[in-house]
Image (cartoon, helix red, strand yellow):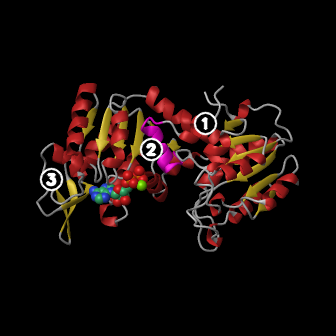
Amino acid sequence: MKRTIRDLKNIKDKRVLLRCDFNVPLDKYGDILDDTRIFESLPTIKYLNEQNCKLILCSHLGRPKGYDKYLSLFPVAVYLMKRFPNKVKFCPKASGKEVSSAVKNLKGGEILLLENLRFDAREEQNDETFVKELASLADIYVDDAFGVAHRKHASNYGVALKLPNAIGFLIEKELNVFSKAFENPSRPFVAIFGGAKVKDKLTLINNVIGKADTILIGGGMAYTFLLAKGVNIGKSIVDLDLVDDAKDILEKAQKNGTKILLPIDHVALDGEKVRKVLLMDQDMVGLDIGKDTIKLFKKEIKTAGQILWNGPVGKYEDKRFRKGTFEIAKAIAKSKAYSIVGGGDSVGAINTLGFNKKINHLSTGGGASMKLMEGKVLPAIEVIDTL
Ligand code: ADP
Ligand code: MG
């Protein structure tokens, strides 16, 4: 068990460095387009603030190369000011004298947000000088930035090695959800996978075999499996190098008692024309699951005890190929099963469709949740002390 902020004692007036994931989409006026990530960080911020710590918040935003006024965290400071009136200060730098003097002036119960860590290239390099600088600001380090927990950066991996540390409520929740989902699932456990490439999902599917009762495969990756079974896939996206791996997966699943269902019909592009087909011709490109597949998958979703979904089952960005993903999302939202959705595109699809309130756990980290689902240990969490 990792130490959490609940386990930290006597932190009143202590300097606490809290790494958040405030990587939210902004428009060019600095308006926050989706505040999910900040909102999910509030319980940890609130808890530490109520303990009267001197709270120093830091985060990255986007992928700047040096300073970029469009990727400033100032809009996040404004957001926090509204939630914690008269308590929030903003430091327009992430490193250097301005930061250390702002921290020196910080009082118990105040919150200081530093500027975007990635304006300093040393952040992503896990540079020792930056690690030391960050560590010198605080007595205790808390990590609640789930979205970057699979990365070894100065502000999460590096600094955790230098200070007494703990995880925040958001990371705690993500860890609990995924460990329960795999170790003690409500059955039947139905996993749904989609997305473009099999390569990205091999480890994930392998980890789920033997744990899930049923795996539904749609999206571009289904075509590698269909080819492995000798089905004509026309010109659909395929990982030819991985056809043998796909065969192995199908065999392994059979041995382990996990049922794998593949698409039985398709919405395909035939030149310029969109066609609904049971079998594909040589020139067709499969871009969504067809209505019979939707029916087949929905039946499994309806009777599931737990659902794990990663990856759209079609090229959902294109309206013509959205129905499959939409119907799957709707069925998950309707189902009584405990539902978990992980992956940037899948969570995006749920949000766009407005089903976010109907999902039990929408993971806040794309890459990080993928790694957890693959059964991997996240480096930035590994370095946090255990109890
Ligand atoms: P997530 O971000 O949820 O993990 P992925 O990134 O793995 O999902 O997959 C999403 C991408 O897969 C989307 O861009 C979507 O267009 C693409 N995709 C899904 N089905 C197909 C298909 N049949 N052909 C080509 N691309 C597809
Ligand atoms: Mg994606």
Q: Amino acid at mark 1?
A: Val
Residue placed under numbered mark 2 in the picture: 370
Q: Answer whether residue 263 is visible to the viewer in this image.
A: no
Residue 224 locus on image (x, y percent):
22, 48
The label nearer to you, 2 versus 1, is: 1
Residue placed under numbered mark 3 in the picture: 278
Residue extent of the magenta highlight: 363-376
Q: Amino acid at mark 3?
A: Leu
Residue placed under numbered mark 1 in the picture: 383
The label nearer to you, 3 versus 1, is: 1
Residue 382 locus on image (x, y percent):
57, 35
Residue 320 locus on image (x, y percent):
30, 65
Q: Pointer 3 and pointer 1: residues touching (CB < 8 Å)?
A: no
Q: Residue reaching furthest front?
A: 129
Sort mark 2 into few (<14), some (14-19) or many (20+) by Cα contacts within 10 Å: many
Q: Amino acid at mark 2?
A: Met
